[in-house]
Image (spheres, rainbow, N blue to C red):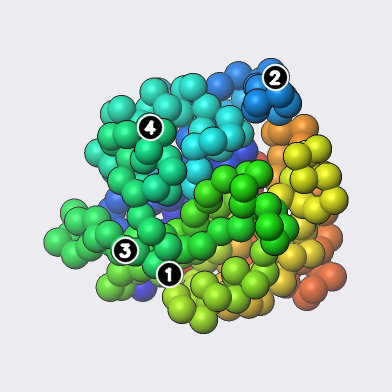
Amino acid sequence: MTSVEITYVGGPTALIAIGGLRLLTDPTFDAPGEYPVGTRKLVKTAGPALPAGKVGPVDAVLLSHDQHPDNLDASGRALLEDVPVTLSTASARERIGAPVRALRPWESVELPRPDGGSLRVTAVPAQHGPDGSLPLVGEVTGFALSGEGLPRVYVSGDNASLDVVREIADREGPFDVAVLFAGAARTPLVPDAPLTLTSEDAARAAEILGAARVVPLHFEHWGHFTEDGAALTAAYERAGLGDRLRLLEPGASVKVP
């Protein structure tokens, strides 16, 4: 089995090199500052480790959702114009149009690989908050990556539900690598529950998915995240899973498994 290389850009943004293809998650390249979401503001505390112009060629963008500036910002939107395909939700397609291709939950697309094979990208459910929060937060998707001779990779997007993780594990798992959006995000929009995985739930998700390696994203660089890398490390150690966690510094890369 070949490896997958993951480069952490910052926030929810990472470059995933797999099967000769380069996939970018939730592109966010704007500077730190305040970003409005309706009548609220999200505060970005750090910029990307790599500017958009230094990322290099991208074969596809895996966009979990477009409606929040911490998952797609102005610079990220500009980048979409230069990428062959952006895979995302039906809502994102309606708002952005081309080059977004909408994938329904469990729908797959085959991306041609340079070696003549293909990478299958399957849209999987994501729940951006507690039960019943969909009308408030909007539609979100995750992704499962697979292909002959390739590791199976799960990219969670902004998901807070372990029930969703269990469903994905049952249908698409087990996974070799899990890219989990964590950080226990909290905003006044849904004041009583996290909008993304807590650190402890991220550790439980690794067990459910059977993932030998976990690379966390979207747990820092924004003011609404309440659990950082130290909290993730502690939760994985408590669960006896410390050897699975690959906590990257911005700009760093790791080859897994």
Distance CA(mark 2)–CA(mark 1): 37 Å
User: At 29% across and 29% down in the image, what residue appears?
Assistant: 82
Q: Which mark is residue 152?
A: 1
User: At 31% across and 46% down in the image, what residue appears?
Assistant: 101
Amino acid type at image mark 4: Ile
Image: 95 above or below 130 = above
- First along the sequence among labels 1 and 4: 4
Is residue 2 visible from the viewing direction of this image? no
Mark 2 residue element: strand
Mark 3 neighbour density, 10 Å: few (under 14) some (14–19) many (20 or more): some
Q: Which mark is residue 108?
A: 3
Q: Which mark is residue 34?
A: 2
Image: 59 above or below 105 = above
Dots 2 and 1: beta carbons under 8 Å?
no
Residue 210 appears at what percent x and percent y?
Answer: 58, 78
Amino acid type at image mark 3: Ser
- First along the sequence among labels 2 and 4: 2
Question: Closer to the camera, 211 or 122?
Answer: 122
Q: How many numbered badges does the structure rendering display?
A: 4
Dots 3 and 1: beta carbons under 8 Å?
no
Q: Which residue is mark 4?
A: 96
Q: From the viewer's perspective, is 129 left or right of 256? A: right
- First along the sequence among labels 3 and 1: 3
Residue 55 appears at what percent x and percent y?
Answer: 41, 32
